[in-house]
Image: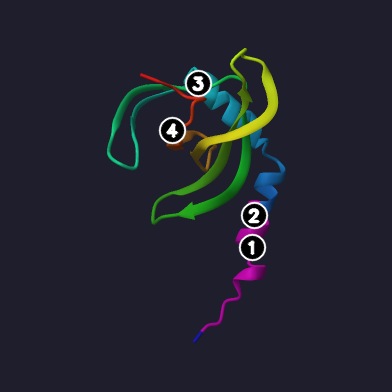
Amino acid sequence: MTILELKNHQVWRDLTEILENLDANILVLEHLNQCDYKVCGYWDEQDEYYETITLPRPLEAELVSSSIGITNTERFLQLKFSLIADAVDATQTPNNHTQKIGELVLVYNENLEFIDENWLLDIDSPMLDIS
């Protein structure tokens, strides 16, 4: 039987190198700009459908996890972000409080070409414009 110790495996060094040379904030901001801060055709966890959800601006995206995946034919990079908005009061003035409004997972192939996205939004958040 072969014993493989993963904690010192090359895959972790590869992932570390990728993340050190990659500005994940640029990727997520580019994605948010391309979708115009809108999520179209969203199904929530209770199977409720929303035609369009508009995200607030400004919106901060914080990288919370990263992983690499390997199938028989493909390799991919998955980046998970927390989406955080500045809370505003009734006068539309920022009040120095932030609120997590959801998460966004972006998936890229080995050439850093976009493959997929997965949104998990807090539908009850007053920060989202739902239609």
Residue 68 place in picture, x, y as percent: 53, 52
Q: Residue 35's spot in the image, x, y percent?
A: 47, 21
Density class for disc 3 (Cα within 10 Å; few <14, some 14-19, many ≥20) is: some
Q: How many marks?
A: 4
Comes first in the chain, label 1 or label 4: 1
Q: For marks 2 and 1, give the CA distance.
A: 6 Å
Q: Which is more foreground, mark 2 or mark 4? A: 4
Q: Which residue is mark 3?
A: 37
Circle 2 residue: 14
Amino acid type of the residue that numbered disc 1 sits on in the rendered structure: Gln
Q: Which residues are magenta?
A: 2-15
Q: How is the image coloured?
A: rainbow
* Residue at the disc numbered 1: 10
Question: Around disc 4, counting alpha carbons within 10 Å, would you say few (fewer than 14), some (14 to 19), or many (20 or more)?
Answer: few
Is residue 59 visible in the rendered image? The answer is no
Q: Nearer the viewer, residue 43 or 68?
A: 43
Distance from the alpha carbon under mark 3 to that under mark 2: 32 Å
The image quarter containing residue 29 is top right
Q: Mark 1 to mark 4: distance in Å?
A: 43 Å
Give the x, y percent position of residue 78. Answer: 52, 45
* Tag of residue 124: 4
Q: CA distance from mark 4 to mark 3?
A: 18 Å
| Label pair 2/1, CB-CB below 8 angstroms | yes
**Which amino acid, mark 4?**
Asp
Q: Tell me which amino acid carries mark 2.
A: Asp
